[in-house]
Image: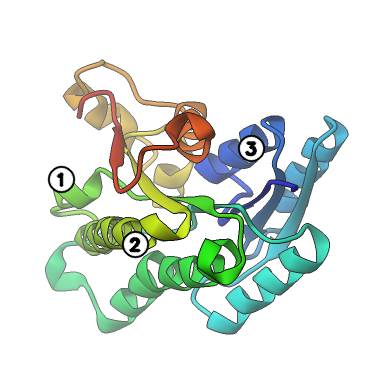
Amino acid sequence: MQQVMIVTGGSQGIGEAIARLGAERGYAVALTYQSNQALAEGVAADIVAAGGQAMAVRAEMADEESILALYRTVDEKLGPVTALVNNAGTPGPMGRIDAVTSAILDTVLAVNVRAPFLMIREAVARMATDRGGAGGAIVNVSSRAAELGGAGEWIHYAASKGALDSLTVGAARELATRGIRVNAVSPGLIQTDLHARAGLPDRLTRLVGGVPMGRVGTTEEVANAVLWLLSSEASYITGINVPISGGR
C-alpha cells in the first residue's frame, strides 16, 4: 500500500522541510498552500525531480469545503492518506491582549484549531481500522508558545496552540484502538521568515540568549522529529508533545 502524506502549509518553512523529508522517506506527498502557487509547485517539482512523488494542492484552512476538496483530490491522485501533518497556522498580528479583536480571534482559531479538527476528522474516515482503513499517524505542529503564553506578542496564537495540544491528547486517546497514533511537536525559536513577515526581523537575535543551547533551531531539525513520530520506530508512542526548542 502506498504511503501518502498530507502536509498542510507545505510550501515554505517547517512545512516545506517536512514535505521534502517525507518524500525522501518514501511518502507520496500532498503539500497544501493558500496563495503562493508558484512557491508550492516549485517544492513539488523539486521533489519529483529528485525521484519522489508530490503534488501541490491549494487549500484554504479556514474553509471546510476547501478541506473536503483537498481530501477528494488526494484520494483521486495519490490514494487514502496514511500520514497527516497539521502544520498550517497563522500567528495573527502581533499585539497585547487589549488589542485583540473578534476578527483576529476568528481567523486564528479557524486556522489553528478548527482546521486541524476537520483535517483529523477526514483522516480518521480513511485511516481508522474500524472503518476499513489500514491505520496511520498524525502529527500536529504546535508551538512552545502554548506553554510560554505569548505575553505581549501573540497571546491569541499561544492560546490557539494550547487548544491544539488538548486536541492532540484527546484524539490520541480516542483513536488509539482504531489504528491511529496522534502526537505533536512544539517548535521554539526556529530559523524561518515568519518573524520577518511579522515585521520583526531581529526577533530571533533578541531572544536567542534565552535558549540554553545558545542557538535557534532549523526547519530540518523539526522535520526529523516529525518523520520519526510518523515512522514505525515510534509505533508505541501516542499522545506526546515533543518540544524542539533547545531547552527553552
> Mark 1 or mark 3, which is nearer to you?
3
* Category of crowding for the residue at label 1, using alpha-carbon neighbours closer than 10 angstroms: few (below 14), some (14–19), many (at least 20): few
Whole-percent x, y for residue 238 in the image:
34, 45
* Upstream in sequence: badge 2 or badge 3: 3
Amino acid type of the residue tagged 1 in the rendering: Leu
> Mark 2 or mark 3, which is nearer to you?
2
Instruction: Describe the colour scheme in one phrase.
Output: rainbow
Q: From the viewer's perspective, is 111 left or right of 39?
A: left
Whole-percent x, y for residue 204 in the image:
32, 32
Whole-percent x, y for residue 25 in the image:
67, 31
Whole-percent x, y for residue 113 in the image:
36, 68
Q: Which mark is residue 171?
A: 2
Residue located beneath label 1 in the image: 148
Residue sitting nearer the eye, 223 or 25: 25
Residue sitting nearer the eye, 176 or 67: 176
Element at badge 1? helix
Residue sitting nearer the eye, 11 or 72: 72
Residue located beneath label 3 in the image: 22
Residue drawn at (68%, 77%) of the image:
69
Q: Are marks 2 and 1 in contact (CB under 8 Å)?
A: no
Element at badge 3? helix
Determine whether 127 is above or below 99 in the image.
Answer: above
Determine whether 22 is above or below 109 in the image.
Answer: above
Q: Are marks 1 and 3 in contact (CB under 8 Å)?
A: no
Amino acid type of the residue tagged 3 in the rendering: Gly
Amino acid type of the residue tagged 2 in the rendering: Ala
Element at badge 2? helix
* Upstream in sequence: badge 1 or badge 3: 3
Q: Which mark is residue 197?
A: none
The Cα atoms of the two marked residues, 2 and 1, are separated by: 23 Å
Q: From the viewer's perspective, is 52 left or right of 69?
A: right
> Mark 2 or mark 1, which is nearer to you?
2
